[in-house]
Image: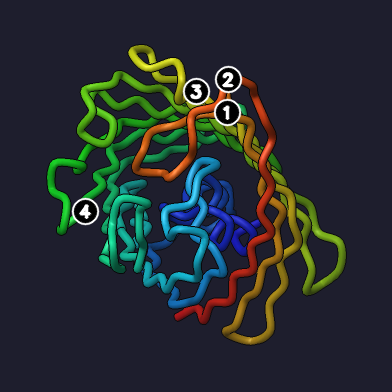
Amino acid sequence: MRLSYQLQQPIRPLALSVLAWLLAPAAHAQLSGSAGLLSNYMYRGVTLSDDRPAARLALNYDGASGWFAGGQVVTGQLAVESHRSAQWTGYAGYAQRLPSGLAWETGLTAYAFPNKPHWNFQEVFFGLSGDTVSGRLHYSPNYLGFGDHTFYGELNGGWPLAPRLQAFWHGGYYYARDNARTNRAESRIGLATSYKDWQAQLSLDLTRQRGGSTTDIYGSNNRGDSDVRHKVVITVARIF
């Protein structure tokens, strides 16, 4: 299950990369990374690259004792920016397997926008994973520097279709306690394949905004009705 989640999650090869590794028979330290191109950098149902292609470099470390850490940098562009800028993400946490066979993880994620440091923020997370499905809950007390208390819950899953082909799905809901207009549900379904050190993914991303609105930095307008938006995203990456 490692392949699907390495490509589909913009922040880290997150829930299943570490947790599936913990479920494996032999645990050992592992360092991995990837460099690739995305046709659109989608994050929790919104574009952080102004609906344009972006480059991404990621590095991840999974320790034999359950500790993990890593990060990525993406050439993103929010709606209020006039040019591309680096968007950094770093994370660290701890994961272990339960006697039932499930695995749990908890940790901290930090987001940094060097050109707009007032947008920097942090989140704590907790996750559970089985063989084919994983879930996570994230909380931030100051999302994007707006002072909003936010929660984001997600479920991820997938299944093999052929030796080099996997299907995957993702669903999430973003809730802002202090700014209900930004609440949104989002989902993703797609296919992922690999050849030697190369991986590729094709996905359909769907987002439903409450009231059809969101914060200005995402570039969405303020309409009174809810709507569903869809984006097709292609990702190609080389794993190292």
Label pair 1/2, CB-CB below 8 angstroms: yes
Q: Residue at x 79, y 52 (%)?
A: 159
Q: Secondary structure at mark 2?
A: loop
Q: Secondary structure at mark 1?
A: helix
As drawn, the label of residue 113 is: 4
Q: Give the CA separation, mark 1 to mark 4.
A: 26 Å
Which of labels 1 and 2 is toward the front? 2
Q: Quadrant of the C terminus?
A: bottom left
Label pair 3/2, CB-CB below 8 angstroms: no
Specify which label sits upstream in the sequence, 1 or 2.
1
Looking at the rendered structure, the kind of residue marked 2 is Gly
Looking at the rendered structure, the kind of residue marked 4 is Phe
Q: Residue at x 70, y 58 (%)?
A: 203
Q: Give the CA separation, mark 3 to mark 1.
A: 10 Å
Specify which label sits upstream in the sequence, 3 or 4.
4
List the residue tagged with mark 3.
Answer: 183
Q: Position of residue 129 (x, y in %)?
A: 58, 36
Report the front residue among 194 and 10: 10
List the residue tagged with mark 1.
Answer: 212
Q: Give the CA separation, mark 3 to mark 2.
A: 14 Å
Q: Quadrant of the N terminus?
A: bottom right
Q: Secondary structure at mark 4?
A: loop
Which of labels 3 and 2 is toward the front? 2
Image position of 57 with respect to 185: above or below? below
Judge the density around disc 3: few (<14), some (14-19), many (≥20) Cα neighbours within 10 Å: many
